[in-house]
Image: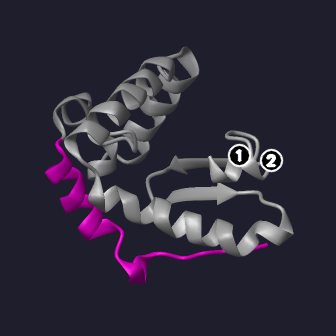
Amino acid sequence: RELEAHGVQFGSHQNAYTSFEETVYWLHVPADFFSRAVELLAALVGEAGAATDADVDAERKIVLEEWRQGKDWGQRATEHHWRHAFSSSRLAERLPIGTLDVVRTATAETIKGFYDRSYAPGALAVVAV
């Protein structure tokens, strides 16, 4: 909400994505709001480790809808390509969005464990342009 109060709109000015190798959060903010935006970004990244079961349930609905919307012919062709390109690794079976079983059953404890392993300060980078 604070970002929106400064004219930053979700989608065109702020968004996130996860690929096989990275999770990226990006913000396009006015220069006079830069310092506060960095603080908000740090809080956003830190919130994943403090997710409650209610938070996970709310996000689960969003992820399941993203999964459903992503099942067009182009995505199916891309997934087929990935399965062959990554056939000798776990990436062939685990797309960045996760397996439906994990998405449907993940708990806050599961998310916290992943967060603690994957979002260590040494693994994070902030790029400002």
Q: CA distance from mark 2 to mark 1?
A: 5 Å
The answer to whether 50 is drawn above or below residue 19 in the figure is below
Residue 4 image label: 1
The residue under the point 28% across, 58% down is 50
- Is disc 1 surrounded by few (<14), some (14 to 19) or many (20+) residues within 10 Å? few
Residue 115 percent location from the top left of the image = 29, 62
Residue 7 image label: 2
The answer to whether 89 is drawn above or below residue 65 in the figure is below
Local secondary structure at mark 2: loop
Q: Is residue 11 visible?
A: yes
Q: Nearer the viewer, residue 69 or 83?
A: 69
Residue 103 percent location from the top left of the image = 26, 34
Q: Residue furthest bottom?
A: 122
The answer to whether 13 is drawn above or below residue 60 in the figure is below
CB within 8 Å, label 2 to label 1: yes
- Is disc 2 surrounded by few (<14), some (14 to 19) or many (20+) residues within 10 Å? few
Amino acid type of the residue that numbered disc 1 sits on in the rendered structure? Glu
Colour scheme in the image? one colour
Residue 117 percent location from the top left of the image = 25, 69
The answer to whether 98 is drawn above or below residue 76 in the figure is below
The residue under the point 70% across, 75% down is 35
Local secondary structure at mark 1: helix
| Residue 112 on the magenta span | yes
Magenta stretch secondary structure, dominant: helix
Q: Nearer the viewer, residue 111 or 100?
A: 111
What segment is highlighted magenta in the picture?
Answer: 107-129
Residue 104 percent location from the top left of the image = 22, 29
